[in-house]
Image (spheres, helix red, strand yellow):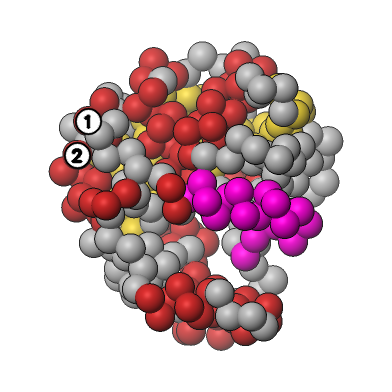
């Protein structure tokens, strides 16, 4: 089951006036779901309904994606975190669980570190602390993603996201390959935001119990980042999905969803 039916988004305003579209589904304690770089809320379509037995899920279209505005500036993981708080304020939510994957995990780090009173529990998936302490993808991956032929680059991204065995039974389409309607300046802004992320010094300020999840075959964000995050966040536990790549939450939906649900229910 997926949650891809059309809905009219709710709207919030960031501190700089940018219009932010967000979406609420389900019933229960609020759970903010944050997608990866250059993606909108549809990143979560295959799995968000799995949480609706216990949670109201809240997603947003990052500035520059989906139904949100695309200003010329303001693209950073810190700004995205402030945008999350603007969405929580607009929806009347004082405290939420937060689950961020990929760049969304980087944004979630800032939400939890800068606004600890707003986060009950934190889940970080397929992400890194950024900056000089992080373990970055190797040069061959960067070159492949920057291939001048868009279809070649897309095939590379699909391969980084999902294992060949899983793709053989699930030919797509895949919701994790980026928002195709982003304007070029916003796409560049997201790339700069993710590359410039460095929350190393702020990670010890995270007070929420934290679960760190990662595929052990992830070449987009290497799993060597897991122990780095766990060592810096005071109350953190970890889990690696054997054989999974970057989109572990989709490919290993039942296992990952079960772990997250158990953690959030703890």
Q: Nearer the viewer, residue 11 or 192?
A: 192
Q: Quadrant of residue 70?
A: top right
Residue located at (33% from left, 38% from top): 199
Residue 219 screen position, x and y as percent: 37, 71
Q: Quadrant of residue 59?
A: top right
Q: CA distance from mark 1 to mark 2?
A: 5 Å
Q: Nearer the viewer, residue 191 or 124?
A: 191
Mark 1 vs 2, N-terminal side = 1
Residue 260 visible: no
Residue position marked by numbered label 1 in the rendering: 204
Residue located at (60% from left, 16% from top): 89
The disc placed on residue 232 is 2
Q: In the image, which residues are magenta?
A: 177-194
- Circle 2: element type: helix
Q: Is residue 124 above or below residue 155?
A: above
Residue 191 screen position, x and y as percent: 55, 55
* Magenta run includes residue 193: yes
Residue 224 screen position, x and y as percent: 23, 61
* Magenta run includes residue 192: yes
Residue located at (79% from left, 49% from top): 5
Decide if residue 51 is on the left or right side of residue 71.
left
Q: Is residue 113 above or below residue 248?
A: above
């Amino acid at each position: 089951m997926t949650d891809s039916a059309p809905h009219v988004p709710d709207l919030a305003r960031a501190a700089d006036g940018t219009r932010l579209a967000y979406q609420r589904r389900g019933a229960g304690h609020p759970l903010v779901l944050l997608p990866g770089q250059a993606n909108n809320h549809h990143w979560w379509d295959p799995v968000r309904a799995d949480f609706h037995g216990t949670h109201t899920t809240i997603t947003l279209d990052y500035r520059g994606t989906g139904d949100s505005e695309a200003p010329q500036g303001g693209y950073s993981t810190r700004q995205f975190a402030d945008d999350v708080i603007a969405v929580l304020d607009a929806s009347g939510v004082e405290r939420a669980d937060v689950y961020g994957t990929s760049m969304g995990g980087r944004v979630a780090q800032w939400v939890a570190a800068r606004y600890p009173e707003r986060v009950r529990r934190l889940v970080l998936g397929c992400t890194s602390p950024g900056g000089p302490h992080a373990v970055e993808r190797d040069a061959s991956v960067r070159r492949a993603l920057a291939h001048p032929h868009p279809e070649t680059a897309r095939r590379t991204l699909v391969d980084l996201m999902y294992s060949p065995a899983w793709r053989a039974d699930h030919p797509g389409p895949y919701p994790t390959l980026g928002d195709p309607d982003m304007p070029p300046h916003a796409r560049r802004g997201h790339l700069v935001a993710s590359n410039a992320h460095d929350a190393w010094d702020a990670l010890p300020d995270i007070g929420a119990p934290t679960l760190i999840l990662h595929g052990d075959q992830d070449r987009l964000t290497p799993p060597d980042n897991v122990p780095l995050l766990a060592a810096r966040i005071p109350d953190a536990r970890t889990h690696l999905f054997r054989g999974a790549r970057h989109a572990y939450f989709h490919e290993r939906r039942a296992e990952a969803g079960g772990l997250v649900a158990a953690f959030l229910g703890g």
